[in-house]
Amino acid sequence: MFQTRLKETAAQVQAHLDATMMPLGHLPVIEAMRYASAGGKRLRAFLVMESARLHGVDPQHAIWPAAAIEAIHAYSLVHDDLPCMDDDDLRRGLPTVHKKWDDCTAVLAGDALQTFGFECVSRAECHTDPLVRAELTVTLARAAGAQGMVLGQALDIAAETAETPLSLDEITRLQAGKTGALIAWSATAGPLMAQQDTAPLMQYAAALGLAFQIADDILDVEGDADKVGKAVGKDANAGKATFVSLLGLKGAKSRAEDLVQEACDALYVYGDDAETLREAARFVISRDS
Ligand code: GRG
């Protein structure tokens, strides 16, 4: 069920991104936006659509925050790949945006993907109630910005030159921003749109986000670069503290499994209706890309 829904979401979100970007034309920066926002697993969009379904939100509305989060995620990857950040040549199995075009185009395409994401959640088609659209916008700004993903990224960069490696608590806090904040926003978009309690899905997403990051650290050690679609072994080679370096491979795997259980338990209020989200949690730690 999860794989089917993930595939359906991927097709829906791609069609929506294509249609919404259509009027933007064909300048290199726009083509770079299209290129960067194509592909990927679409896990964040899936979380939006599934949390929306659980709360009876019309998918025609939910597709807007789903497209928004994938655009903002794509921006973060484009900027993260730049030579001044993680300096990567490959992403999703293809040359990174600054390799295919140049650094300026990559910076601008990332910027434009970010503003495009905010446009998606503030457009009238996203929700009939302007207050809900404002709430989606403000919470997305917090998740993506200086209290969320940007903070996590800044802490990560600072850690590269720090005298002492980060502790487990520090890494956990860093990752809650860097990867966790967008995942948490995605999983709570449904109840937020339905103006219902976000707490159970927030708890689910906190555990899921951390499990996702631990799986990412494991893939950096054990993954196959062809399947992952980007270079592996970078963190270990750079001597960076990761969940694997701090807990060991076995310890990291066991922590990820505990977190998946925690994520599944947080969904008890939804009963069997949340089975696809439980499957998503199990997928996050078994994925090979
Ligand atoms: C530049 C402000 C700024 C932030 C960048 C997301 C991020 C912060 C950096 C990416 C580095 C990285 C590999 C983080 C690990 C977790 C992660 C976000 C992996 C990529 O997400 P997936 O696996 O990718 O969902 P797809 O391609 O499937 O969308």
Image (cartoon, rainbow, N blue to C red):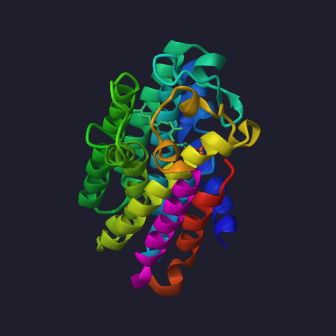
* Residue at the farthest right position: 226
Q: In the rendered image of this protein, does residue 240 appear above or below residue 108?
A: below
- Which one is in front, 129 or 86? 86
Left or right of 53? Residue 141 is: left
Quarter of the picture containing the N terminus is bottom right
Magenta stretch: residue 262 in it?
Answer: yes
Query: In the displayed structure, does residue 287 sit left or right of residue 118?
Result: right
> Residue visible at 36% across and 53% down?
124
Q: What residue is drawn where x is 37% and y is 44%?
A: 171
Q: Camera-side residue: 112 or 231?
A: 231
Residue 150 in the image, given as x and y percentages of width and height: 34, 35
Q: Main secondary structure of the magenta part?
A: helix
Residue at 49 percent of width and 54 percent of height: 66
User: Is 92 situated above or below 133?
Assistant: above
Q: Is residue 39 visible?
A: no
**Towards the viewer: 262 or 13:** 262
Point out residue 270 in the picture as x, y percentages from the top left corner: 44, 82
